[in-house]
Image: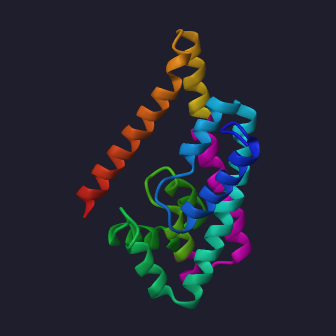
Amino acid sequence: MGIKDPRLWLAGTVLWGFAEATFFFIVPDVLLTAAVLVFGLSRAFKLCVAASLAAAAGGLLMMQWSLHDIEAARAFLLSIPLIGGDLIARVQSEMQGAWPLNLTLGAVTGAPYKIYAVEAGALGINEALLAVVSFVARLLRFSLAVGLTWGGLMFARAVGLRRFASVGLALAWGSIYAAYIWVRLNAH
């Protein structure tokens, strides 16, 4: 079993997708975009499906927790790095309206999915509906990241910089997280 073993990547993707939906604060997109470089577009998209299923399962767990003890679930969210009361209040407001759309858009606007899952429980949203919307929303977001990475890789190949693709990906993720951390630290 080596670094290019597809089973290892599948297991990592499932674990990361579930973890990020519950307690982890680094998105599975990091692993999924790396999969583009290691395996190509087709396998990376298959891993997106696995990560989306795992994230939906994690979201259902968070929803169940909030159904039983919403205050404990919210307190737990506040213990996760970069999640503040402002994000929870934002998601609470968004869940009052067109929550499926807001859950989907939240994935690309900096609101962690786990907050939506907790607030779905607080509102008594149907579990099956949350699972379906969660799967689709996560799949769209993960696929967007994979597609953008593929586009970047094709550009790097076209201009003769393919060998620097992994460095470019690392710099991209470093920049994304630096910007997000800066925004979140200045939001409190």
Give the vertical position of 113 relative to 118 (above or below).
above
Give the vertical position of 10 relative to 59 (above or below).
above
Question: Is residue 4 or residue 112 the one in the foreground?
Answer: 4
Q: Is residue 100 visible to us here?
A: yes
Position of residue 103 measured from the top left corner of the image (x, y, whole percent): 55, 61
Residue located at (48% from left, 54% from top): 26
Q: Is residue 124 visible to us here?
A: no
Residue located at (45% from left, 60% from top): 111
Residue located at (32% from left, 52% from top): 181
In the rendered image, which quarter contains the N terminus?
top right
Give the quarter of the image for residue 151.
top right
Is 133 colored magenta in this rendering? Answer: yes
Is 157 colored magenta in this rendering? Answer: no
Position of residue 48 measured from the top left corner of the image (x, y, whole percent): 68, 47
Position of residue 100 measured from the top left corner of the image (x, y, whole percent): 61, 63
Residue located at (54% from left, 17% from top): 163
| Tally of numbered tags | 0
Asked if residue 143 lies left or right of residue 108, the reply is: right
Asked if residue 112 lies left or right of residue 186, the reply is: right
In the rendered image, which quarter contains the C terminus?
bottom left
- Read off the magenta span: 119-146
Give the vertical position of 138 relative to 58 (above or below).
above
**What secondary structure is the stretch in magenta mostly built from?**
helix
Position of residue 10 measured from the top left corner of the image (x, y, whole percent): 72, 49
